[in-house]
Each structure stands twice: as structure tokens, then as C-alpha cells.
Amino acid sequence: MGLETLSITDSRTGKKYEIPIHDGAIRAADLRQIKVSQDDFGLMSYDPAFTNTASCISRITYIDGDQGILRYRGYPIEQLAEESTFLETAYLILYGELPDEEQLAEWTRNIIHHTIPHENIKKFIDGFHHDAHPMGILISTVAALSTFYPDARQIHHAESRRRQTYRLIAKMPTLAAFAYRHMIGMPYAYPDNDLSYPGNFLNMLFRMTELKYKPHPTLERAIDVLFILHADHEQNCSANAMRNVGSSLVDVYSASAAATAALYGPLHGGANEAVLRMLKEIGSMDHVPAYVKRVKAGEERLMGFGHRVYKNYDPRAKVIKRLADEVFEVTGRNPLLDVALEVERIALQDDYFIQRKLYPNVDFYTGLIYQAMALPPDMFPVLFAIPRTAGWIAQWEEMLQDSEQKIARPRQIYKGAGIRDYVPIEKRKVKAQA
Ligand code: CMC
């Protein structure tokens, strides 16, 4: 097929333009040639919240929101959740291919080697108030890592980037677990590098006085699967923050702190925490219809429902629903599960949700699993941030390698006041009226 184009006739001038189409998109910069006069800036596209703007070309994660498909580097999420481990999946996301045995062993060795943070990290975690939200602690400590590793500023050196990747993926569970131990007033538990990545995380969360913590294999595997499911999700709010902040060429820790902050919000990674609070507020199955009525009246949002991209069941939610049963066999059934199932049942047959294609997303059932594992809701977004770090770093790497990328800097449509002269304070209207 020849070059595909979009034919545009500007009704202001009558001029015609042929705008090339590549990969189902036009380049917004091609619109700039459309002008009403020589000194006109040129036509822009207006897209608040980037609902129809591709900001990059990516080869990491594929989503088909209508079909409910999610793949990392071409591999279906269901297969990875069934067959892979988080560390192997992180390698795949970062380097593009599944590792062979030797590569996986070396990757794992490098991660294990970097799990212990500098002792000073503990000192400033100590400085946080006893009820500080662990996500606030995590954002701050991730940012602080840049002060311990000034070599991270060498972002154009592949070896430096590789080193920071090991450090960040290795230290996220440690920082997260330290934030949790601070929150509950327990001494920090150090990493045990004999354990797997998720097993060690459980060890740092829950070890008491025992000499050797032994994670329950079902819970260890459940954490691993949840980490796989959360590892990347293409250009979401936090990945966009990572690329955006990273495009200023700041170090990876500072950019990751920005991404972690983006994840904290209740419309993004904070939704799992919000779901649990919502289910608690609903309280019992017979209160569900009244709550759904309030949602439909616009008084509430059904947290854990809806997605910018998925207009079908989130494939991650399907895996998590099955995983919940395995976890509850060990921990006992979370009584809020019945409320959640009833919310899903009622919502999925209600016109409001059907018309808007609102389905349970990844956050709808995760909180129930984490709570069954004895973790408080404040920790839920933290558990999201740990695995998503792999995705953030992959997105950052891809952005740095992309010769088309520059510092991210959107345009605006200015509708504020025109030029006016400064008014001395005694002559201002507000004072005159007083
Ligand atoms: N409950 C009730 N109504 C909803 C919901 C919801 N959860 N989500 C969307 N809607 C309605 C919304 O009111 C709008 O209705 P109308 O057309 O009448 O104005 C319509 O559906 C379209 O919604 P939108 O807000 O334009 O959709 P969006 O793409 O901007 O927002 C979302 C996506 C995920 C922020 C939103 O669905 C939401 O707030 N969900 C609840 C929070 C949540 O679960 N977030 C986790 C997302 S998945 C994990 C992650 O990315 O971190």
C-alpha cells in the first residue's frame, strides 16, 4: 500500500493539506503547517489528559482494551502469571527477552547483592511520624537514594544505568518493608538473601524473633504472581510521570520518586486501598444496592471499577480472582469477599456500568488478598509500587534510547488576561471596595 494520508481542508483559508498517516497516527507537529497567516503559530491538537495522544513508540507492553488483552514483550499475562516468576518477568520487561538459565542466575545474583540499603536510610525513616503513610515514606526514601548514589547522574552510561537498575529493583522491597515496620513500631528486619524475592519481602515484613523466617509457599507464590501482574502497564499515569520527569535527564531515583508519587493517587495505585475502605463502608451484601444507587447518582465512584484503556474485564483481575481462593485457603476467607462479589454481580448487570463499559480492574480484588495476609490498607499502594518499578525503569530506558524523545513540554491554549499595567496596592479595586 502507498503512503496513507489524511486530507484536510482548512475552512478558514480554503487551503488543502495531505498529512501522512503512520501506524494509525498522524504527527501532531505536521498540523503546525496549517496556518491562517505567516505569523500564526500553526494548528495544535488539544488533548487534556492525553485521551487520544500517543506520546511514544514502545515495544514493552501491549494492551487491547476492547478484547481485555495484556502482554509483556508479546507474552500473554496469563502465561507469565502461570509459569514465570517476578524476577524473570522483570528481566523480560527490562531487556526484551526471557533470560536463559545463566542470565537468570546472574540477574538474580545481582539483585540479591543489592537488597541492603545504606544504614542512614533507617535514620531518616525513624524521623517520620508514627502514623506516616508508608507511601509517603517510600516516595521520600526512593528520592533519597539519589543522594547515596551520585553516579546515577551518568544516565548516558549503560553500565551506570544497569547498576542503578539492580539497586532500585533490589531495594524497593526493603524500603517498603522498612516503612511498614516503622508504621507498626517494630524493629527493621534485614533482607535474607537465601530466600526468593517475594519470600524475602514477606520475611522483612513479618519476621519476629525466629532465627530463620519461612514464608508459606502459597503466600510466597501469591505475592510473586501479584508482582508479575503489576510489573508494567504501558503509558499509565505513573509511567508517564517517569518518562516526563526522566526526560529532563534527572537520575532514575528522582524520576522513580515522581512515578511513585503518581501511583499514590486514589485514581491510580491508591485505588486498591480505596476499594477496601469502600467495601468496609458498604459493610454487608444487603447494603450493596443502596451503595450502587449512590454511585449512579454521582455521589460516589465505584473504586476498583473502570479503566481508561480496558473496556472489558481487566485480564489481571481475572487472574487475581482465582488467586484469592488459593490465598483464602491458607489465611481463611476474607468476609469482605462476599460484599465484593455482590458489588461485581450487581454492577455487571446494571445499565449504568454496561453502557459505560465499567468492569472490575486490577485493584478490585488485590486489597482483599493483602488484607487476608494481615497487611493494612495503607500498605496496598506500596505493594503495587514494588513490582511497577521494573516497568518504570524499562519505560525510562526506552525513552532514553529513543532519538525522537526530548524534554517533555506540552503546549497550552492561553485564555487568561491580556496585557495590563501593574496597579500599586493602594489603588487596587479590592482595597477601594473595603
Ligand atoms: N464508578 C462510577 N462511574 C465511573 C467509574 C467508577 N469507578 N469510572 C468511570 N465512571 C463513569 C464516569 O463518571 C463517566 O460517566 P459519564 O460519561 O456519565 O460522565 C464515564 O464512566 C467515563 O469515565 P471517565 O472518568 O471519563 O474515565 P477515565 O478514563 O477518565 O477514568 C478511571 C478511568 C480508572 C480513573 C476511572 O474509571 C475511575 O475513577 N475508577 C475508579 C478508580 C480506580 O479503580 N482506579 C484504578 C485504575 S486500574 C489500576 C491503575 O491504573 O492504577
Image: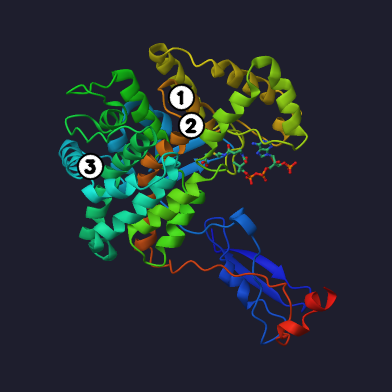
The reply, left or right, for residue 186 in relation to residue 46 is left
In this figure, which residue is indicated by the disc labeled 1?
Answer: 371
Query: SS at mark 2?
Result: helix
Say which residue appears at 65% left-offset and 16% top-offset: 285
Q: Position of residue 219 (x, y in %)?
A: 34, 21
Q: Nearer the viewer, residue 115 or 100?
A: 115
Which residue lies at the image location 40% right of the left edge and 36% below the top edge?
383
**Residue 295 in view here:** yes
Type of the residue with mark 2: Pro
Which residue is tagged 2? Answer: 377
Q: Secondary structure at mark 3?
A: loop
The one of 39 and 368 positioned closer to us in this rendering:
368
Residue indicated by mark 3: 115
Question: Mark 1: which secondary structure?
Answer: helix
Q: Residue at x 34, y 34 (%)?
A: 181
Upstream in sequence: badge 3 or badge 1: 3
Question: Mark 2 packing: few (<14 Cα in 10 Å), some, or many (20+)?
Answer: some
* Image position of 13 with respect to 312: above or below: below
Residue 60 seen in this snapshot: no
Quadrant that contains the C terminus: bottom right
Number of disc labels: 3
- Note whether 75 is above or below 140 in the view shown: above
In the picture, which quadrant includes the N terminus?
bottom right
Q: Position of residue 12 (x, y in %)?
A: 78, 76
Residue 216 higher or lower than 227, as above or below: above
Which residue is at the far right?
433
Q: Quadrant of residue 213?
A: top left
Of the two numbered discs 2 and 1 on the same chain, state the one appearing first in sequence. Answer: 1
